[in-house]
Amino acid sequence: MQKNHWLNNKINQFPDYLLLGVILFLCLIYRLFYFGFLHPGLVLYNSDSVSYFVFVNIFKGIVDLYRTPLYPYMIKVFEYISKDNLVPNLIFFQQAISFLSIIPFYFVSKCIVKNKYLMIIATLFYGCWHPILIQNVHLNPECLCFAGSILMLLVLVKYTEKPKRLTAASLGLLPFFLVMLKPTYLILIPVALLFMVFRFVLLREERKILYWGLLGLILSAAGILGYCEMNKRHNGQFALSNIALNNTLFHVSYSGAYREGGDEEFIAIIDAKRHLGHYYTVPFTINNDFIDRYRNYNKRFPQYLPPTQDMTACLNFPDTPNYPPERIKRFIRNSQRTTVYLKYMMERVFLIVAGAYGNLFILFFLQSVIIGFVFFKYRKIAWIQGFCLLFVLGQFFSIWLVGLDDMDRHLMPSYPFIIQIAASFLMVLISFLKKEEIVEVIL
C-alpha cells in the first residue's frame, strides 16, 4: 500500500507536458508500426466515399442533396493543392488531425476523470484503439468527427470550469460546423439548448453569459435552416441531407410495411426487387435520383483506385424513372403509419439496446443512476456527464430512426464521449472501493 502511495505521489508530481509527451511518443510509435508495418499504404474507401466527391460552392448556393459540404470542401482543397496526390495528401492530413487530437483529449480527460492513472489509460486508449485508427486511412469524414467531438468536449469543459462569453458563444456556434461535417451532429442543437436552459434557470449568475451561448445556438439553427433553403433552391428539396430517405425506404421494404403504402407501382417494384437486396436495389430503383448523381460523383473520384463491389453495383445500376420526391415521401409516410412498421421499429429498439449494444446501455444506466444519486443526495448536477449521456443517447436515437446495419459507423462521433463516460464510471467505482465521496469525482 505504501509503495502504491509513493508511486501515486510520484506520478502526480510529473507536469502535464511530460506525461502528454510520453503518451504522444507511445501513440506515435504504435501508429508508425500499425500503418508502416502492419498496413503499409492502406487506403480504405467504398461507395459512400465516392459520394463525398461532389462539387459544392456554398457561396454560389451550389450544394448537394446528400452530403453536407465540409468534407467535400476539404477534398476540393486537396484537389487544388495537388490533384495527382490528392489521396496521399488527404490521408496524411487525416493522420495529422487524428494524432493532434490526442492533446485536447488528454486535457478533457484531466478535467472529467480527475485521476491520472485513468486519464493516461483513457488517452492511450483513444490514441491507439483500432476502430479510431483505421478511420485515418478511410476516405470519409469519420476521422474528422473524432476531432470535432473532442473539440466540443473541450469547449464544454472550459465553459463549466470558468464560464465566459467566448466559450458560451463557441458552445452555441460549434454545432453548426459539426453538422456541416456530418448531419448526425444535429442532436447537439437540442442537447446544448437543454444544457443552457437548465443553467440559465438554476445559475442566475451565469445568465448574462448564457445569452451569448443562446445567440450562438440561434445562429447555428439559422445557418442550418439557411442551408436547407439552399438545397430547396438548388435541388428542389428543403432538407439537410436526403440520405435518410434512402435509409427509410430500406426499413419500409425490410419490415414489409411497404405493402400498406398505398402506391401500387411502388409495391410492385419492391415485390420484384426485394430478393436482390433491400438497400442497393429497392431505394435506388424508387429514388433513382441518387444513382444519377452518383455517376457524376464518380467522375471526380480518383480513377486509379479500383472500384469496390458496392461502387460497381452503383455504377452499373440500370436507369429507372426519377419519381417525384413528394410521391416517395407520401408512400413512406403511409407505410410508417402501420402496425407492421411499429412492431418492426420496436424490435429494432430491442436489437440495439439489448442486443448489439447491451453492454454500453448497462454502462449508461449505471452512470445515470450515479448522476441521479448525486443530484438527490447532494443537490449537485453532473453537467458534463449529463451532456455526454444525452448526446450519445441522441446518436442511438438517430441510429434507431434512420440508421442501417453499419451501426458502428453511425456511432463513431460518440466514441470520445463514450470513452469519457466509461473512464468516469471507473473512477466512481474506485472511489466507492476507497470509501470516498462520489460527488468529488463525478462533478
Image (cartoon, grey):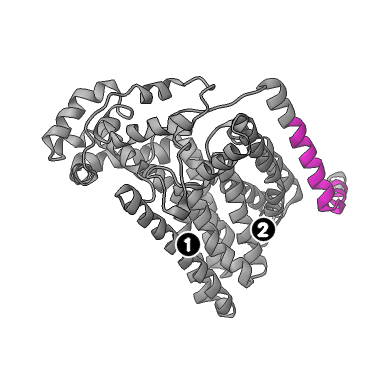
Start-end of magenta stretch: 5-30
Q: Is 362 rendered above or below residue 36?
A: below
Query: Callout 1 environment at 10 Å: few (<14), some (14 to 19), or many (20+)?
Result: many
Disc 2 element: helix
Q: Which mark is residue 344?
A: none
Tag 2 residue: 441
Which one is nearer the viewer's eye here, 442 or 293?
293
Residue at 51% x, 57% y is 175
Please name the residue that numbered disc 1 is placed on.
220
> In the rendered view of the protein, which quadrant contains the C terminus?
bottom right
Residue 82's place in the image compared with 224, above or below, is above
Q: For the residue marked with disc 2, what is the amino acid?
A: Val
Is residue 114 visible in the rendered structure shown here? yes
Give SS at disc 1. helix
Which residue is depicted at the point 37% across and 24% down? 315
Q: Position of residue 255 (x, y in %)?
A: 25, 34
- Main SS, magenta residues: helix
293 or 393: nearer the viewer: 293
- Badge 2, how many Cα within 10 Å: few under 14, some, many 20+? some
Q: Amino acid at mark 1?
A: Ser
Instruction: Specify whether 329 is left or right of 14.
Output: left
As drawn, 421 above or below 25:
below
* Dot 2 and dot 1 residues touching (CB under 8 Å): no
Disc 2 from disc 1: Cα separation: 33 Å
Nearer the camera: disc 2 or disc 1: 1
